[in-house]
Image (tube, helix red, strand yellow):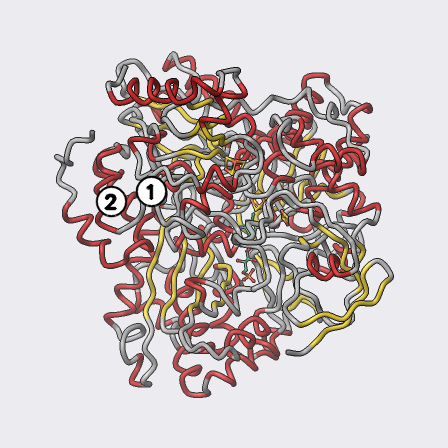
Amino acid sequence: MSSITLTIDGQVVRVPAGTTLLQAAERLGIQIPRLCYHPHMTPPTVCRLCVVEWEGARTLVPACVAQVREGAVIHTASERVQRARRTILELLHSAVDLSETPDVARYDAELGVDPQRFVDGVWREAPFYDDNPFYVREYEKCILCWRCVQACGDDMQFTYALTLGGRGFHTRITTFFDAPMPETTCVFCGNCVGVCPTGALKGMDEYLLERGVPMALLREEKQRRKGRLETGR
Amino acid sequence: MLEPVTYPLDDILARWQPYGRAGLLPCLIDVQERLGWLPPDACVAVGEALHVPLADVYGVVEFYALLYPTPTGEMVLRVCDDVACFARGSADIVATCSRLLGIQPGETTPDRRFTLEVHPCLGQCDRAPAALRGLVPVGNVAASAVETVLLNGEVAPLPQVVGDERSILLRRVGRCAPHDLAAYEADGGFEALQRALQIGAGAVIAEVKASGLFGRGGAAFPTGVKWESAAHQSDRTRYVVCNADESEPGTFKDRVLMEGDPFAIIEGLTIAGYAIGAQKGFIYVRGEYALAFERLQMAITKAREAGYLGEDILGSGFAFDIEVRRGAGAYICGEETALFESIEGKRGMPRQKPPFPTEKGLFGKPTVINNVETLANVPHIVRHGAAWFRRIGSEDAPGPKLFCVSGNVAHPGVYEAPMTTTLRALLEMAGGVADGRAVQAILLGGAAGTFVPLDALDTPLTPSALRSMGATLGSGAVMVFDERVPMLDVLARIGRFFAHESCGKCYPCQLGTQRQWEMVQRWHAAGRVLAEDMPRFGDLAATMRDASICGLGQTASAAIESWIRLYT
Ligand SMILES: Cc1cc2nc3c(=O)[nH]c(=O)nc-3n(C[C@H](O)[C@H](O)[C@H](O)COP(=O)(O)O)c2cc1C
Ligand code: SF4
Ligand code: SF4
Ligand code: FES
């Protein structure tokens, strides 16, 4: 395979063709912030936290998918890059509950994020669903990273119970006509819960324990919830 | 559980079933035309017939503004409330509708006869204020006539754009009957296709390259270069697509061409298909353009009957056909990759580029996508040659251009001129500012464009001249606002437009367009641009421009930023 030489933050690096900027930077020990990227899933390229400056390009480019090119000169932490990352996080803080999203606190500190900057805007109200015995869905914590939809669909399970709904600011994760999970094609494989990075999808055990249900009563509580569901009460 | 479907949908399902997922949007549109909305059981039937997961069917229904997962009233009144109509009094029309019907926009009357909606730009700015009754256009609505025209449907004939003999793109518009193939042929129609088939694909591409034609859809990319790139791909399955989604506020030229000269677009697209070795073409028309859709379909049928489309075009052995698709209320579907997703039966969300359409476009195949007006130029170039084309305009901006002049001018309409023309000349063509008032502001290029300084009225509208003042021609929209128009309200409407039309895929635009809209609404309420908002507005605008996936987010702040630069 041919190899490619480029410059990242002043350091010259040689990598195989087809390497992404994210991977190339990692070889140099440079960590690029990211939220939606997951190494085993199709990169949705939605969060744009990984954007970097490519000299000569009109806009910033997402490092998670942009591939290296001979002679490229990349800046992963220029003021222009940091401004975009900082503002994206400030926007997110104003619409979504990020309390359980990993790395956000660290990014906030590194970039000097002001979580209050846009809070006079409307909050993205989103429902809480406790409609099945296996997991809950707390969508105010959802960052719309698409992972659950991808895991339920082409990337893992081929079950297609989940979809994006709405548009723009009001985009959300939902099901066919917002049906409760047991009425969808969901097989409760748990893949979506496994890949959700934010606590928006949470296994029932974890959820109940967090709510103070004692370990010893977990089984009973779940049995009770299951019964409630099946009898439709 | 859901009951089995009890409506007669079998014919619709049977028609679209062979298309699989690519039949989803037209199938949903047809079902909705029959039922008035898209009930869950009908969506189940569609999903099962086309083998589309039900969740995905619903995701698509929710994406498109003209698809309804809940019942509407019998008549949906779509009143344009966007900038060009606003400059001509649309706020009064909306308020009068509201009062007469006793409902707010977005609501349905208790007797279920009417649903009232305010709609983003309908592409009828030459007849502003405009509205659609269902999909039937109504123009020049007076507040006093809302009851007779909008509610009772006593619709008067609409004023039409009429070209003249000296024009090139408009010469047949309003002068030849749009369904008259013989008249098109008598005016030299389909001669270019014959010539193309004689000189061969390579020579066609060379001619188009030499002509210097660049895209008229907004991005101004050289057309010949695009064709050449697609023609060089190793994959032999290729597509050409005509982008007729025309939804940029203040833009209506493509509608005028499609309604007035549909054969020219078919000829242009067929030549493009021949040049790059495509087997099939699509024309994607915005859902609000019912008449254009109808006329294109009619023209395609006639062209096919006459041997200009089909298995063996004019005995050349070239096989090519065209399918017209309708959009369903989404500005973003004019973005080329979102348009592909839409034809493929998905939510119209743009793809990260690269790969570019010429490498992996529609159905993952090499694709050339061109704007309606771009394609309308092609037959002239092939027929008369690149040198003839270059005699019009300038070295860096050859060929004729259509300008959509709207807002407070005496005669809003489509005007043809070389790009060496100026705003002053266009204003004159449109009869000047209405009622002798003074110009307050001019927005060039639509909502995604920029306000231009009023001392630049004599700047030529060529890309290089405009670039030097930080503007672009965009789609060719020129919106004129006179001294009475409350400009902060205009800015608020631009903000609303982008918030409404953001697809929601990438964070900068999904969140940023909402926050921007809220900010301009506050300025509008305060009666001034709030200085304390400037630092965060600057960061927001820069972030959308720099980090968004597509041109929507990248330009969502351009007009507002330019206004602040010029007027505060
Ligand atoms: C948000 C958005 C909307 C667009 N809408 C249209 C449109 O309605 N019609 C169009 O021709 N191009 C539109 N474009 C530009 C297309 O992406 C593409 O550049 C164009 O169709 C290419 O054709 P051309 O080279 O002939 O101009 C839009 C772009 C963006 C980002
Ligand atoms: S629910 Fe979780 S996995 Fe799904 S989009 Fe939201 S944050 Fe991502
Ligand atoms: S910029 Fe806006 S419209 Fe374009 S992909 Fe991002 S969210 Fe969608
Ligand atoms: S990590 Fe690259 S866009 Fe999200």
Chain hosting mark 1: B
Looking at the image, is A104 positioned above or below residue A26?
above
- SS category of the residue bearing label 1: helix
* Residue B318 figure quarter: bottom left
**Residue visible at 31% across and 62% down in the picture:** B299
Residue that badge 2 annotates:
B46
- Which residue lies most toward the right here? A10
- Which of disc 1 and disc 2 is earlier in sequence? 2
Q: Are marks 2 and 1 in contact (CB under 8 Å)?
A: yes
Amino acid at circle 1: Val
Looking at the image, is B502 positioned above or below residue B297?
above
Q: Position of residue B373 (x, y in %)?
A: 51, 60
Q: Callout 1: 10 Å neighbours few (<14), some, many (20+)? A: many
**Residue visible at 52% across and 64% down in the picture:** B357
Q: Which mark is residue B535?
A: none
* Residue A83 figure quarter: top right
Q: Tell which of B263 and B218 is nearer to you.
A: B218
- Which residue lies most toward the front here? A216
How far separated are the C-alphas under marks 2 and 1? 8 Å
**Residue visible at 33% across and 21% down in the picture:** A223
- SS category of the residue bearing label 2: helix
Q: Callout 2: 10 Å neighbours few (<14), some, many (20+)? A: many
Residue that badge 1 annotates:
B57
Image position of A142 (left or right of B100): right
Residue B435 visible at all: yes
Amino acid at circle 2: Val
Check mark 1 vs ligand 2: CB closer than 8 Å? yes or no: no
Q: Tell which of B249 and A75 is nearer to you.
A: A75
Q: Position of residue B276 (x, y in %)?
A: 47, 76
Residue B188 visible at all: no
Quarter of the picture containing the N terminus of chain B is top left
